[in-house]
Image (tube, rainbow, N blue to C red):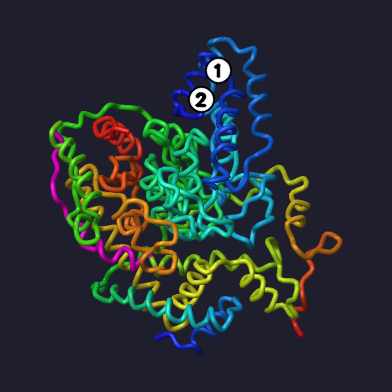
Amino acid sequence: MNLNELTIKQASEGLRQKEFSTTELVSSCLKSVREKDDDLHSYLAVFQDALEQAKKADEKISTYRNVEMSNLPPLFGIPLAVKDNILIQGKRCTAGSKILENYMASYDATVISKLKSQGVIFLGKTNLDEFAMGSSTENSGFGPTKNPHDSTRVPGGSSGGSAAAVSANLCLGALGSDTGGSIRQPAAFCGIVGLKPTYGRVSRHGLIAMASSLDQIGPLTKTVEDAKILFEAIAGGDSFDATAIKTKHDSRTTTHELKNIKIGIPKEYFGQGLDTEVKKIIKSALKKLEEVGAEIQEISLPHSEYALPAYYIIVPSEVSANLARFDGIRYGLQETSAKNLKEVYTKSRALGFGPEVKRRIMLGTYTLSAGYYDAYYLKAQKVRQLIRQDFEKAFAEIDFIIGPTTPTPAFKLGERSDDPLQMYLADIYTVAVNLAGVPALSLPAGYSETTKLPVGLQIIGQWFKENELLNFAAQVEKLIKPKD
Amino acid sequence: MITPKKVEHIASLARLELTAGEEKKIEKELSAILEFVEKLNEVNTAGIEPMTGGTNLKNVTRSDEQIDKILEDKAGDLIDAVPEKRSGWINVKAVFE
């Protein structure tokens, strides 16, 4: 097996046993990037100093004996990719947008500081839909990324670059961000694992903000075990993020008996719009769970059909506020033909932003404007409360909610890019999770029969119970592992 | 709902210069999306508190101390990012005409 095909867990063990060096591990990934990424376009920037960092890491541990080796942080020497809306000091951060094409980050995101302190080797920044707005990575200002399973199809979005890079073994794991499904949906489309933590679990300091009440950074990895390792490295409170909770995370790995676990299947998630092949795969996974003693019951999340409309008021509203800072003055590109101050704003933003971004800013400006705020934003936030309550009521009876991550497998490049509403429908099972703030994970459940594309199963857990979610997901992963 | 005049007004508020073609396209798209979100009117939200953030946290404060200790060169980095600058200052157009 090539080193870049290892999981984080396998690689960290191999490094500790001195079976190979960090330099060899990183070189293997970089070689694969050179071979595949011209075609795949998962990376926007590959770091020239990654190999140098690897050599320094090897020098550091060259004199270490077994005890010191075994005390290395879990992610020491591990090559990871980072979605290009998360700041790494001294490196460009574009948010997938022309408006930030040459912007150099002046500080590290908190998650990056945490990973640096463990000795992670960052390989580069991955492609995304512009400002994380999209479900296919086609909205990137720098060209789309392809799905490694079928190059005529999208990898999903907005963390499409990260998902494709992990799936194609161009890194051992990656960071993404999820506001309405942007980690889970591309994870499902690319056949890998993606976790969106509870809102407030991971600091957003250094994440270029999209919708501040929904955004979360999370891991994209090859296995659930890897997702747990990466999640634990980045979770935690932060003085720079007032919304990050300081609860201590319980990281004990307990092997849950699947027997007697109560699983809720929302009837609203198996209705119209769900592809029959996806449904078949999810049902088959549920059957396996039932066979080992899990208790499956149908539940209702009655406000499910209102999640997407609520989301598409709340998100553009918050986006219109968050993107006001891109004024062509303090950073980013400026339209030099501007004749006065207002034109500096209107022309720079017109030049730098892509169509989806403009669309959402316009929508959000409208919904927050005088006379419309109550009818739209306030109404949506009330419906959001009801959606949250749906989950609270459900979790009083069951431990986890399971359903398909997406209604269909990956669609073709260009198939939905002209119809915003069609594109929005890709997130129908993922947005309610962000609105409620609960954690959720997508893991590979199989391949569609006719098109042979990955299908993801979504597990939704209770607020701040990522440990239970990850432990359960690891069990499910073992049980339903698709035959490659 | 959305009229061409409204589109112009919103674009001005949003500080976005749109071409005539973009204005027409966005008028259609916004109308379609607003029609879609009208669905929320089906929900009875009487007496429901709006969820104003992602958590139930209120008034999260910290003591007014400088946390970021390493400030050397930070100002320089920020100015480096500015597109129009002069002698270490941000160069802007006249605020009043």
> A220 above or below A56?
below
Does the magenta run of residues contain A300?
yes
Where does residue A425 sit, x and y in percent of width and height?
Answer: 34, 62
For residue A384, say whether it is visible. Answer: yes
The numbered mark 1 sits on a residue in which chain? A
Where does residue A379 sit, x and y in percent of width and height?
Answer: 34, 73
Where does residue B49 sit, x and y in percent of width and height?
Answer: 32, 67
Left or right: residue A75 versus residue A56 is left
Task: In the rendered structure, find residue B85 and report the number of the disc placed on it.
Answer: none
Residue situated in front as seen by the camera: A78 or A263: A78
Residue with the mark numbered 2: A3
Residue situated in front as seen by the camera: A306 or A422: A422
Whole-Å distance between the Cαs marked 2 and 1? 9 Å
> A448 above or below A179?
above
Residue at image location 25% in from the left, 74% down from the top: B46
Residue at image location 78% in from the left, 52% down from the top: B76
- Determine contact: label 2, label 1, CB under 8 Å: yes
Where does residue A387 sit, x and y in percent of width and height?
Answer: 28, 60
Which span is picked out in magenta?
A: A293-311
Left or right: residue A459 versus residue A226 is left
> A475 above or below A321?
above
Residue situated in front as seen by the camera: A385 or A420: A420
For residue A461, say whether it is visible. Answer: no
- Give the amino acid at mark 2: Leu
The quadrant in which residue B3 appears is bottom left
Task: In the rendered structure, find residue A20 and report the number of the disc placed on it.
Answer: 1
The quadrant in which residue B89 appears is bottom right
